[in-house]
Image (cartoon, rainbow, N blue to C red):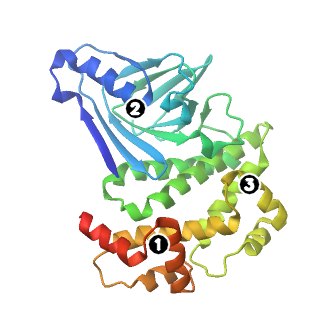
Amino acid sequence: MLTASFLTSTVPSAQRRAYWSKVMSAYFGEHSAHCVNEGIFDACLTRYDIAALQMYLISCPPHWIERGEVRRDCHASDYMKLILPLNGAVKITQGGAVIQLGCGDWGLYDSRAPYRVDVDATEILVMLIPRSSLIGFKLDGLQCSPSQHPETRGLNSVLSAVLRSLAQYADELPASVHTSLAETVLGLLASALAAEQASRRGQLHLPAVLRLRVKHFIAAHITDPELSIESIAHEMRCSKRYLHRIFEEEGKTIDRYIWWYRLERCRDTLQACAGSKRSISDVAFSWGFNSSAHFGRMFKETYGVVPRDYQREVMLSH
């Protein structure tokens, strides 16, 4: 969902570099921006919120940005930052390490530590990844997609393709798919990081990876009324007790997570089809509920309103 857009062309030419620094600082923490070439600085930033992810599409001339130490209470400290050039190249420098990204390569870096990003591209994608979604991974340095390991090349390519598709079709994505898309991106990123760390024989917190695999399995089978912790344990080749233990950090049991995920998908669908002839029962059954009465009770318990009244509120708000 488009939430903000900024163009330097809306301010006088002499003020554009300062304006760009102000915009960048507003969304990514305090930055300084420096243009490589003299002349008019034409740039544009557009932000999209895709569930828990913040995606920014940036068009700009060659320039570089720099950031110093960040307060731990700063909003940006809650996120890792992913960057992907849609054309041209980007260089990221942080903690004495440097990575070079070509078109379609992605890099992940810590937004809390000082860094410099040199942009020799006219279009880039920047995504803020909630730090909490990557708990358990050893992310003490720059992470990037270029790799010679067969286990990671495919994952990196798929993640890159998904990100480029998001950039291309961001204006056309219905709200009903935002959560699924965000979980797809997070799952692919986590899988790529896990494979890369395993290939380097680095430390890997396996419960974090398994927890993400469980979430992806749930997302892929949520329409199945028979989805249960038993079927998940069988697929993951582990015990139900172990699954319960690795899911403790979620603040809800796996069973409750399944029902919550179904409710979220139903709510998105009810919003998308408000005013249509599709019945509420059909929506509930399509997402794995096998009782419309049970669905109605859980929906009201979770959102404080029955499904029909929720649809009425959606229609009135439009």
Quarter occupied by the C terminus: bottom left
Q: Residues within 10 Å of mark 2 (few under 14, many from 20)?
A: some
Amino acid type for the residue under numbered disc 1: Cys
Tell which circle, 2 or 1, labels the residue nearer the N-terminal end.
2
Residue 80 location in percent, x, y? 55, 35
209 above or below 82?
Answer: below
Q: Earlier in the sequence, mark 1 or mark 3?
A: 3
Q: Nearer the viewer, residue 36 or 279?
A: 279
- In three-dimensional space, the C-alpha distance between marks 1 and 3, rounded to whole angstroms, equals 25 Å
| Residue at 70% across, 41% down | 196
Residue drawn at (57%, 50%), measured in percent from left and top?
Answer: 186
Q: Judge by depth and name the residue closer to the eye, 204 or 315.
A: 315
**Which x, y percent locates residue 120?**
39, 25
Instruction: Tell me whether circle 3 and circle 2 mark residues in contact (CB < 8 Å).
Output: no
Q: Which x, y percent locates residue 60?
A: 31, 29
Q: Which residue is mark 3?
A: 248
- Residue located beneath label 1 in the image: 266
Q: Does residue 158 sit above or below 130 in this rendering?
A: below
Residue type indicated by callout 3: Glu
Q: Residue at x 70, y 51 (%)?
A: 249
Residue where numbered disc 2 is placed:
27
Q: Who is closer to the viewer here, 19 or 267?
A: 267
Alpha carbons under labels 3 and 2: distance apart: 32 Å
Amino acid under label 2? Tyr
